[in-house]
Image (cartoon, rainbow, N blue to C red):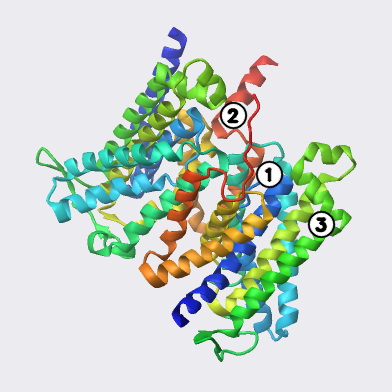
Amino acid sequence: MAEFLQFLISGLTVGAVYALVALGFTLIYNASGVVNFAQGEFVMLGGMVTVFVSAAGVPLPLAAVIAIGIAVAIGLLLHRFAIEPARGASAVTLIIITIGASILLRGLAAIVFDKQFHKLPAFTGDAPVDVLGAAVQPQSFWVLGGTAVVVLALYVFLEHTITGKAVLATAANRLAARLVGINTTTIMALAFGGSAAIGAIAGILVTPITLTSYDVGTLLALKGFAAAMLGGMGNPVGAVVGGLLLGLLEAFGAGYISSTYKDAFAFVVILIVLFAAPQGLFGRRVVERV
Amino acid sequence: MRALLNQRFITLVVLAAVIAALPLVFPSGYYFRVASLVWVSALAAIGLNILMGQAGQVSLGHAAFFGIGAYAVAIGPTHLGIPPWAALLVGAVLSGILAYLVGRPILRLKGHYLAIATLGLGVLVALVITTESRWTGGPDGMPVERLTLFGWRVSGSYTWYWVTGGLLLIGTWIALNLDETPTGRAFRALHDSEVAAQVVGVDVARFKLQAFVIAAIYASLAGSALAFMNGFINPDQAGFLHSVELVTIVVLGGLGSVVGSIVGAAVLITLPQALTIFQEYEHLLLGLIIIVAMIFMRNGIVPSLSGLMVRRTRS
């Protein structure tokens, strides 16, 4: 039981990070139809900037805010100078552009920072908390709580503010949104900024547990993309559920079956799910009209 | 038809001439090596282009087949006593069979779902290669026995330049001809509209699968060639980033353009070599160049340039 609980909590912790990355994917995908493979780099930036700014003597909370600010600025620049000029290009061209952006950001991070691994101190100490026999790092609660706050904030924003509704309208039908006077370009910029902020928050929360370096973004982007697809691309609830599910799969797979094939479980399950339900778990069935 | 035949013929002659002439301007053996790398990548990219450019299906895990080809010629002779040349064939057959088996369910998916499924396949193959270190040497990779053909030991960057150049010519010839066969036309019908293709009687599932198998065999042979050439192989060759590199080559050069894949490979392989003078700025510049190229030549280098030329001559 204690063992089960241990795997459950570590799975949810990792899954929460995947969920945040997947949410970032979803937000940008909905607003602009772009699958942003540089999403993992926002997570990297969140962690790396916080590490280096706090090492320069800035208190941790302020360093975190600066990190989020920098990530948002880079997200906006990415939209303004890479995505916006390529408007109307095919999906695969846009994917290549974001992959180019991810290579660029990784290269930039390697120059501005370095190529070492870095750690942040846990926000509230390292003494494990006993939860029904399972030893849980306090930072896990920060990750889970932080994710919950982000998800809740995003929900309130989308459902209860005019701007949020404009985002949903743009996601539902871009042309119709423009026709009712929504500035879809602004909405897209907002989505890129928001995704960058969400990614950076994920990076800051998880760095005390998993370490960070200039090249952690790729694997995170893969897992986040997988989580988003598992839930059904474009569905925020699906992204969160997909992310948590992916984390749990990995934790239980590693715990009960084989830790060397930890990364494999996620992808095997995704393949199985896609074979059974080609639109993902929560995806809408799209009827193509010809 | 005659004009097309001529155009294909001219393409092959020009390619052969370029391959034959390049050594005249190469100042050192290092250039032979870089050029061989370009030929190998171009071979894999031409195959992938049949899947992506002609049949219109994305594969983000194509390096898996490249890796299978590479590890077949490494594992076959070392662990199983298969002669190196036979191991190359075994790798190609294995890649073809794997593509056939997973292709049918995977290719039912569309767009991003197809992308993630192929990506998953790629990650799984790379993971098996990295983990089964008893066979593959794990993350450190493993040495590859030299290829011997009829008692002739194929080695040295000079020799491999001609071998890979020859392979590329054959690969290009097949791809150019395929375009004009009923299969090639069926691929293009698929690309434009699956529904329309189905309506006129194209067996959509079968042709998608064919394109996938052909692309896999191309990649496998390219992987084997690279492994023989380097005399060493590591899991990076099967990894996600290499898959991305192959897709980038195809898209950068031009979807559907055989020449484009070769140009794309030449740009993407030589660029990092040229950029090493900037050392730490290498990745930054590479990313920047990819972004700028895709924004300003979104159809790829070759179609964009030829489109430009057509417009010039018209005006």
Seen as rendered, the residue at the extreme front is A1
Q: Secondary structure at mark 3?
A: helix
The residue lying at 54 percent from left, 44 percent from top is B113
Looking at this view, name the residue that lies furthest to the right.
A181
SS of the residue at dot 1? loop
Measured as percent of width and height from the top left, residue B81 is found at 12, 51
Residue at image point 33% right, 37% down = B217
| Residue A216 in picture, x, y percent from top left | 53, 66
Chain-order first, disc 1 or disc 3: 1
Task: Mark 3 vs mark 2: give the one in front.
Answer: 3
Q: Are marks 2 and 1 on the same chain?
A: no
Q: Amino acid at mark 1?
A: Gly
Q: Check disc 1 and report the residue beneath it.
A: A33
Q: Are marks 1 and 3 on the same chain?
A: yes
The residue to which callout 2 is attached is B305
User: With respect to residue B74, does B52 lie above or below?
Assistant: above
- The answer to which of A199 and B40 lies nearer the viewer is A199
Which chain does the residue under circle 3 lie in?
A
Q: CA distance from mark 3 to mark 2?
A: 47 Å
Residue A112: assigned label: none
Label 3 neighbour load within 10 Å: few <14, some 14-19, many 20+: some
Residue tagged 3: A159
Provide residue A222's location: percent of width, then percent of height.
53, 57
Could you say whether the residue bearing mark 2 is in a helix, strand or loop? helix
Please state if B87 lies on the left or on the right of A102 as rendered.
left
Residue B248 appears in the rendering: no
Amino acid type shown at disc 3: Glu
Three-letter code for the amino acid on which mark 2 is drawn: Leu
Q: Is residue B260 above or below residue A137?
A: above
